[in-house]
Image (cartoon, grey):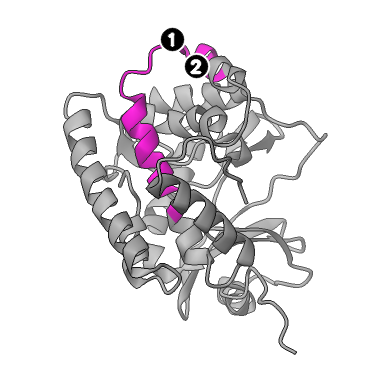
Amino acid sequence: MTGSPQPDAAYRPSLVPACRQAGLTADGARLLRVHANAIYHLPAENAVVRIRNAAALDRMRIAVKTAAWLADQGYPAVRPLKMTQPIVVGPNIATFWEYLPPGDGRRPETKDLAQLLRDLHQHPLPPFPLSPIRPLGYTADEARISTVLSEHERNWLIDRCSELEEAFARLTANLPSVIVHGDGHTNNVIPHPTLGWALIDWDSVGTGPPHYDFMPTYLRPRRFGYPETTWRSFAIAYGIDPADENHLQLLAQIREIRSLSAFVRGAQHNPAAHAELNNRLSSLMTEDRTRIWHAL
């Protein structure tokens, strides 16, 4: 009998070859998380390796360059290791980062995230080109090549992406453009030994309206069952009125659709991702606002 595929089955074969190319050892490597990519702790190197599909090569180059520049500027971004990266291994790419241990077990609050994002949004732009964010990411592309979506689901998702892309362009024509993290939530905030907290996961960094970075927190009470105070405490700490939802409804719809991308990609190998994809997609297609979503 064949067992269920491991959630990191698409990435693990690249682990040892990537480390070898980087001059590092994968001895004792431990999977920390797998979703849009697989993240492994390399204890012998005091480092973390992130492995994902090579289609993201260009944006991972930007992620590494931007995070390194921000860290050099004193901003609390997790540092990439100093080497030529990303490293291409077959169908995947690998990036290597400093490992920041859990420390004393502190967990970030929404106010900590709000301060990190506010400081990022106020930071000067880098001295190299930083492209505008893709508000829907690569969701439509993932849908086109997916083997788990039905034809009806695929067509609906591609059409919805097109509608929202056009609406985003109209909305942001007169909004400020700043450095945007692109996936700012408390799971991407970790303790830093000297700077308090650090932001990780720079895969989606770009320029765009600061409001875009509010979406993960804004959606927590609306989709994930969190109390409404989650959004209120974030907004107050950031310095905005939590009752002012101008621009936020459309951006929330965009973020909801974008969130499907990693699930579409991971559903083929990860049963939990497949189940959550079905949960989210069906609730969106039927406009069911009561359905609770689950993070992986």
- Dividing the picture into quarters, in which one does residue 252 lie? top left
The quarter of the image holding the N terminus is: bottom right
Check the image and report above or below for 31 versus 175: below
Magenta residue check for 170: no
In this orientation, which residue lies closer to the viewer: 197 or 223? 223
In this orientation, which residue lies closer to the viewer: 228 or 184? 228
- In contact (CB < 8 Å): disc 1 and disc 2: yes
Left or right of 234 on screen, residue 16: right
Q: Residues within 10 Å of mark 2 (few under 14, many from 20)?
A: many
Res 57 visible: no
What is the secondary structure assignment of the residue under circle 2? helix
Say which mark, if any, is on residue 235: 2
Q: Position of residue 240 (x, y in %)?
A: 43, 12
Of the numbered discs 1 and 2, the one sitting upstream in the chain is: 2
Left or right of 136 on screen, residue 94: right
Which amino acid, by three-letter code, is at mark 1?
Asp
Residue positioned 34% across, 42% down in the render = 206
- Dividing the picture into quarters, in which one does residue 142 lie? bottom left
Q: Position of residue 234 (x, y in %)?
A: 54, 20
Magenta-drawn segment: 234-260
Residue positioned 45% across, 78% down in the render = 91
Secondary structure of the magenta portion, mostly? helix
- Dividing the picture into quarters, in which one does residue 100 lie? top right
Which amino acid, by three-letter code, is at mark 2?
Ala
Say which mark, if any, is on residue 241: 1
Q: CA distance from mark 1 to mark 2?
A: 6 Å
In this orientation, which residue lies closer to the viewer: 277 or 165? 277
Residue positioned 50% across, 36% down in the render = 184
Magenta residue check for 235: yes
Residue positioned 56% across, 76% down in the render = 21
